[in-house]
């Protein structure tokens, strides 16, 4: 049986406004993340393809008709592979939405189901990326 993932570091707030995580656990795992080779680690952890939702878009989606344009804020797409690592955007995924192929920063997407095996690796990367800038 697979061990349960230790999410004690996750400081995200619950619906009641409380965080189940703790700062000591966060500090400990963040120190580990700082040493991690993210692209290599993610290639070993992630199982492609998998579904993601774009939850961040560097602000530009707020000024476009995101319903018509693919890969925008709120859109669900299939992550097909890791495309590259970029100095500004970090890990960039190759994604597919309907019949279009594009690229989206991994830090801009979420795996919506906590039961998906890719949820925690993506969450770890997104939290590290947000705190490393």
Image: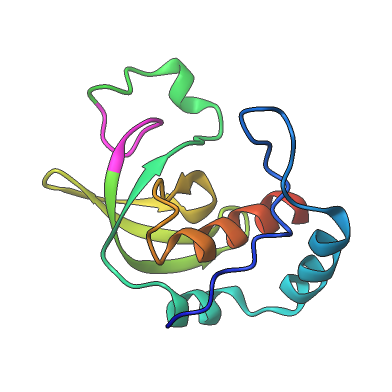
Q: In the picture, residue 69 is in which quadrant?
A: top left
**Residue 60 position within the rendered picture, expressed as x and y whole percent measured from the top left:** 49, 26
Please indicate whether residue 59 sits to the left or right of residue 19 in the image. Answer: left
Q: Position of residue 63 (x, y in %)?
A: 45, 16
- The chief SS type of the magenta part is loop
Q: Residue furthest right?
A: 24
Q: Residue 25 magenta-drawn?
A: no
Residue 74's place in the image compared with 40, above or below, is: above
Q: Who is closer to the viewer here, 59 or 110? A: 110
Q: In which quadrant is the N terminus drawn?
A: bottom left
Q: What's the residue at 47%, 19% (across, down)?
A: 62
Q: Quadrant of residue 17?
A: top right
Q: Is residue 39 above or below residue 99?
A: below
Q: Which residue appears at 68% of the width and 78% of the height?
A: 36
Residue 74: within the magenta?
Answer: yes
In this view of the protein, which residue sits in the foreground, 112 or 66? 112
The segment highlighted magenta reads 69-76
Which residue is found at the position 64% from the left and 67% from the top?
6
Query: Outermost residue toward the front?
Result: 1
Q: Find residue 9 and report its horizontal and vertical position in percent.
A: 74, 59
Q: Is residue 2 above or below residue 106?
A: below
* Residue 100 left/right relative to 127: left
- Residue 12 falls left or right of residue 120: right
Where 126 falls versus 14 (above or below)? below
Left or right of 52, for residue 119? right
């Amino acid at each position: 049986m697979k061990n349960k993932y230790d999410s004690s570091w996750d400081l995200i707030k619950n619906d009641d406004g409380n965080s189940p995580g703790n700062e000591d656990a966060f500090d400990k795992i963040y120190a580990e993340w700082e040493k991690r080779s993210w692209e290599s680690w993610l290639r070993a952890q992630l199982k492609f393809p998998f579904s993601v939702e774009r939850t961040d878009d560097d602000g530009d989606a707020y000024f476009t008709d995101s319903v018509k344009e693919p890969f925008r804020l709120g859109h669900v797409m299939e992550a097909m592979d890791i495309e590259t690592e970029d100095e500004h955007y970090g890990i960039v995924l190759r994604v597919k939405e309907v019949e279009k192929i594009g690229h989206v920063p991994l830090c801009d997407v979420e795996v919506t189901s906590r039961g998906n095996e890719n949820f925690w690796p993506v969450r770890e990367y997104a939290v590290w990326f947000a705190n490393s800038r």
